Image: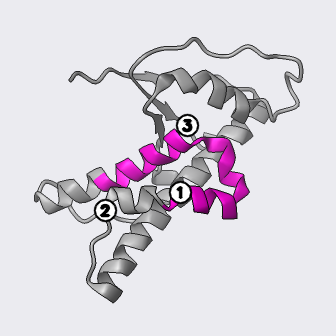
Amino acid sequence: MTTLRQTFRLYPNQSQQRQLFKARRLHQYIYNACLAGRKHAWETEGKSLKYFDQQNKLPQFKKNNPEFAVLGSQALQATLKRVNLAFQAFFKGLRKRPKFKSLRNYSGWAYLDCTLVSKTLHKICSKSKANPGSTSSPNKISGLLRISTSLPGR
């Protein structure tokens, strides 16, 4: 199976940039929370958490934290997959142990199913007041989409 990866540079206005920054911060929080959950499970119970263990907790997590609902389930699952891949590389001896990431070192997030990209990005960016009547959305593409954002002021 071939994976197509496309990276896009977005040129958002100020209001949209703030919304994308909030989404990036939420993804960084999920990444660090999953890392902490795996570390805690190993240190307290001697149990290794798997991807599906953490994925099955996402619906309850989104219920308890409604600010994460705007991100979409597949984007959150892609962040969990990122943690899982980091641990797999560590256990194979290819990389060092995964570390907690600061917002500065968290580069972006991915969408596994790009047919949802236009709807999700529109949902994130439409919270801005700059284009209140705009319903335009990016073209639908197939493959893996990685969103990279920079910190405000950079």
Residue 43 screen position, x and y as percent: 31, 85
Q: Earlier in the sequence, mark 1 or mark 2?
A: 2
Magenta region includes residue 81: yes
- Would you name the residue on which mark 2 appears? 50
Which stretch is magenta? 57-84
What residue is drawn where x is 43% and y is 72%?
36
Q: Are marks 1 and 3 in contact (CB under 8 Å)?
A: no
Quadrant for the N terminus in the image = top left
Q: Give the mark nearest the N terminus, 1 or 3.
A: 1
Residue 84 versus residue 38 in the image, above or below: above
The CA distance from mark 1 to mark 2 is 13 Å
The main secondary structure of the magenta stretch is: helix
Q: Which residue is mark 3?
A: 149
Task: Give the x, y percent position of residue 151.
Answer: 60, 44
Amino acid bearing label 2:
Lys
Task: Give the spatial CA distance, label 1 vs label 3.
Answer: 24 Å
- Camera sees residue 152: no
